[in-house]
Image (cartoon, helix red, strand yellow):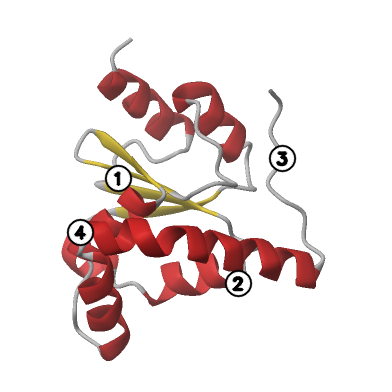
């Protein structure tokens, strides 16, 4: 199975067969949830499906299909490719509308691939600390 085929079957398994873009993120993370809600993807990217990694075995499906741990980064499926972690933030920044200050700021920061890669570990640390403080578990998948 090629990468494109595994992404296509994953997209179908996530209930997003006809989506132009699929974003798989941690719905219990206050930062991830806020970021996704504030993005204006639908206006510029077409049919967008937002998928909480904690629902409907989404995290396990991603791990089985692509071998990715969603505790280590969000996933974006777009244009027949999978973008993970800093690369996901980078592609989202290029797809978002810059119609307000928040989107313009995040787009200008994360559209610089090198900056997205430098900042992403700090974002992951912030997520881990927020989950700990709020008493929320990490995303669980089997090996």
Q: Which mark is residue 140?
A: 3
Q: Residue at x 50, y 74 (%)?
A: 34
Which corner quadrant of the image does residue 30 belong to? bottom right
Number of callouts: 4
Question: What residue is disc 2 on?
Answer: 30
User: Residue 89 lies in what quarter of the image?
Assistant: bottom left
Q: Left of 8 or right of it: where is 67?
A: right
Q: Residue furthest top?
A: 1
Sequence-wise, which precedes: disc 4 or disc 2?
2
Secondary structure under tag 1 reads loop
Q: Label 1 to label 2, Cα distance in Å?
A: 25 Å
Q: Position of residue 79 (x, y in %)?
A: 19, 39
Q: Nearer the viewer, mark 1 or mark 4?
A: 4
The answer to which of marks 1 and 4 sits earlier in the sequence is 1
Give the residue displayed 77% in from the left and 61% down from the top.
Answer: 136
Q: Which residue is mark 4?
A: 45
Closest to the observer, 27 or 127: 127
Q: Nearer the viewer, residue 118 or 71?
A: 118
Give whichever of discs 3 and 4 has the lower sequence position. 4
Q: Nearer the viewer, residue 20 or 111?
A: 111
Residue at x 33%, y 9% (from the top left corner): 1
The mark that comes first in sequence, 3 or 2, is 2
The reply to whether dot 1 and dot 4 touch (C-beta < 8 Å) is no
Q: Is residue 86 left or right of residue 42?
A: right
Rendered image: mark on residue 19? 1
User: Disc 3 and disc 2: Cα gap in Å?
Assistant: 18 Å
Q: Secondary structure at mark 4?
A: helix
Front disc: 3 or 4: 3
Residue 83, horizontal then vertical, whole percent: 32, 43
Q: Residue furthest toward the right?
A: 135
Q: Compared to 71, does 3 lie above or below?
A: above
């Amino acid at each position: 199975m090629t990468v494109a085929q595994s992404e296509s079957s994953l997209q179908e398994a996530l209930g997003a067969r006809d989506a132009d873009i699929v974003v798989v993120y941690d719905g219990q993370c206050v930062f991830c949830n806020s970021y996704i809600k504030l993005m204006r993807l639908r206006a510029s990217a077409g049919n967008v499906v937002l998928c909480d990694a904690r629902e409907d075995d989404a995290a396990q499906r991603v791990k089985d299909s692509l071998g990715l741990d969603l505790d280590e980064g969000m996933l974006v499926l777009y244009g027949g490719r999978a973008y993970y972690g800093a690369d996901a933030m980078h592609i989202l920044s290029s797809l978002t509308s810059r119609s307000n200050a928040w989107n313009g700021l995040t787009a200008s920061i994360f559209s610089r691939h090198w900056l997205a890669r430098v900042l992403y570990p700090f974002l992951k640390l912030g997520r881990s600390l927020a989950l700990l403080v709020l008493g929320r578990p990490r995303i669980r998948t089997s090996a």
